[in-house]
Image (tube, rainbow, N blue to C red):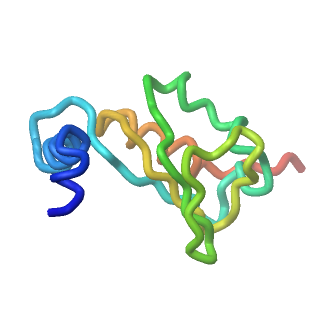
Amino acid sequence: MASEMVRPTVTSFIDKMLRDKEAPLRVEEISIPENSPYIGHPVGDIDFKGIGNILVIAARTSDLEWIYNPYPGTIVEKGMSFIILSTRQERDLLQALVSTAVESKS
């Protein structure tokens, strides 16, 4: 309630974004699985913009620490999750991208 009084436009925007089922962009979450090829690499290696107009809002580390607006140099960890602004289709494509295990060449 206090946030609504101090920042009414921000509160209204977030409320609409979270509740509007017809909005093309939504606040979404993706998780980094244990076999992700991005573990140990910088966030900048993930092609968020190549999938669509994905905006990374925050990352949550495996020890439950929040990193707001993570820098491209932030290292991706097993169990990390990202809060993003995207369409549902972009979210699904991104989740598939970070979940694709690298096949070893023998």
| Residue 1 occupies quadrant | bottom left
Residue at horizontal 68%, vertical 42%?
Answer: 71
Left/right of residue 67 with respect to residue 13 in the rendered view: right
Q: Is residue 36 above or below residue 52?
A: below
* Residue 73: % across, % down: 77, 43
Q: Residue at position x 10%, y 35% from top?
A: 22
Please say if 77 is above or below 86: below
**Residue 104 screen position, x and y as percent:** 82, 51
Give the farthest residue toward the right: 106
Give 22 or 17, whichever is nearer the viewer: 17
**In this rendering, is residue 23 above or below 5?**
above
Side (left or right) of 13 relative to 19: right
In the displayed structure, does residue 69 sit left or right of residue 39? left
Q: Residue at x 21, y 29 (%)?
A: 24
Q: Position of residue 87 (x, y in %)?
A: 30, 34
- Please give left or right for residue 43 compared with residue 21 in the image: right
- x, y percentage for residue 7? 24, 46
